[in-house]
Amino acid sequence: MPFIRSSGVLLHPTSFPGRFGIGDLGLEAYRFIDFLERSYQQYWQVLPLGPTGYGNSPYMCYSALAGNHLLISPDKLRDEGLLDEEDLTNLPNFPTDKVDFEQVAPIKIQLLKKACENFKTRASDIQQQKFTGFCATKAYWLDDYALFMALKDTQNSSSWYTWEPAIAKRQPEALERVQRQLTDEIFYYKFIQYEFFRQWSELKSYANLRGIEIIGDIPIYVAHDSADVWANPEIFCLDEQTGEVALMAGVPPDYFSATGQLWGNPVYNWEELQKQDFKWWVQRFEAMLDYVDVIRIDHFRGFEAFWTVPQGEETAINGKWVKAPGEELFDVIKQKLGKLPVLAEDLGVITPEVEALRDKYEFPGMKVLQFAFGSDPGNPFLPFNYTSNFVVYTGTHDNDTTVGWFNQASDYEKHNLLLYLGCVSPDGIHWDLIRLALSSVANQAILPLQDILGLGNEARMNFPSVGTGNWEWRYDTSALTQELSDRLKVLTKLYGRAPQGK
């Protein structure tokens, strides 16, 4: 659906400052919301919030519906009476400019396990009732997820399709046996989900009360080694004997990679999903709308046709396009959930059929300014080619920062950009592109915080097709100054994106 003229900031919670080595849902998250309010922003866009696996990518999570326990704030656990002040002392000297996941995870998990044990003995009747209610309400995914993670712990984190066949294939007697054996471990995983969603809900309420809506992110695919695939193998294209991926997801060669991107996720068995009236997808959207206000669908074009690569290929080159029943899916979701607040990530190889699917449901598409200056005036990313029902970005989590991009851009791109701008402001190229985004006719403008801060490629969040070293950037606690807020506020108001009445 079309949105009012507005703007916001893209920032993943792991990037918040803080003493625990990774951003969390504590004080700095609230300070960031205050910064958005002062700056007249109306949106906070996050990346997927799930529990990450190898490579720490939020686009490869152990569950499509669970929350990342590393985002839980130990300070808030202390405030709740589940940790003591001495539990939070003698912390390592974590890096402040990036997340060292290998260093952070064991420390954070140790604190979470202690909080879980304290919950068993210290929780009030009200706390226990809330926990029981949470477990009952979320049982349709939480039971499978908690058991899946408990099993992974007993299997040295090995993938589910390598487990004992009776467990991998979810034979009822085998599941009952391990549920009895892993009672404490299952309780722990349910507890940390309860805590994540409790803290997240409080933060979301704080944001909403200040006029800030949260844009969440649904990756179209889920990780092969996930509770979703283990619990619902029939809706994915798997080898029935081994559980391995039979048909892999990815994209053909594009701007980011000459060999395409081979993601390794299993593609969907859409025929089976149709037989089930898309129940899994309806539940996924419904669950997402419980804790975000707007959904960005990553790789939207995959709902019209998807690139599928046979098992055994090492690149995405030898794939093919296969049609998907996107129209039928969105009709069912609309019928069951009403008109959806959705943004469509429609980057890549976009056909008229993809645009027609997007436009039928009035989903805003995406425009990225960094893509605008490498070709002729027909380039769809040039602002004069926009229509209003779009969201414009200076760059996304997959792009370099604007400063980093400009420093490495070709002479041709630089020439076109400078010619387009007419002149370069003394404030830096990042503010020029911020102005360009805010002044465009696109209803929404989303700015990565790295661009607002004017940072170079040292602050880049992700290099597509690179498996490690991503998702680590963090900003300094002193970065969100009043001067920065005032500058963003002035431009936001100047270009008609301020909240009503401001």
Image (cartoon, rainbow, N blue to C red):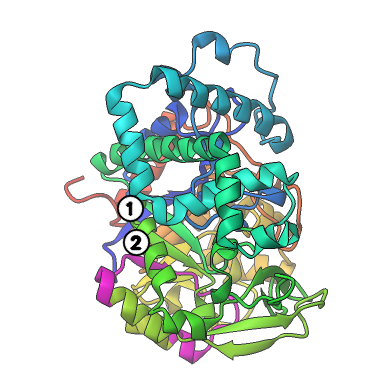
Q: Answer yes or no: do the residues labelled 1 and 2 have beta carbons within 8 Å?
A: yes
Which image quarter is the C terminus in? top left
- Neighbourhood count class around disc 2 (C-alpha, 10 Å): few under 14, some 14–19, many 20 upward: some
Q: Nearer the viewer, residue 500 or 334?
A: 334
Q: Which residue is mark 2?
A: 286
- Disc 2 residue type? Glu
Q: Nearer the viewer, residue 424 or 228?
A: 228
- Neighbourhood count class around disc 1 (C-alpha, 10 Å): few under 14, some 14–19, many 20 upward: few
Q: Nearer the viewer, residue 257 or 432?
A: 257
Asked whether, in this view, residue 431 is left or right of residue 109, the answer is left
* Residue 326, image x, y percentages: 44, 83
Residue 43, numbered circle: none
* Residue 324, image x, y percentages: 51, 86
Residue at (39%, 72%) from the top-left corner? 279
Secondary element under disc 1, as helix, strand or loop, is loop
Q: Which residue is mark 1?
A: 290
Q: What is the magenta range?
A: 335-355
Q: What count of labels does the image hold?
A: 2
Residue 304 visible in rendering: no
Which image quarter is the N terminus in? bottom left
Residue 125 visible in rendering: yes
- Disc 1 residue type? Asp
Residue 480 is a magenta residue: no
* Residue 112, image x, y percentages: 55, 28
- Up the image or down, 162 lies above or below 10; here it is below
Outermost front residue: 173
Residue 338 is a magenta residue: yes
Outermost top residue: 86
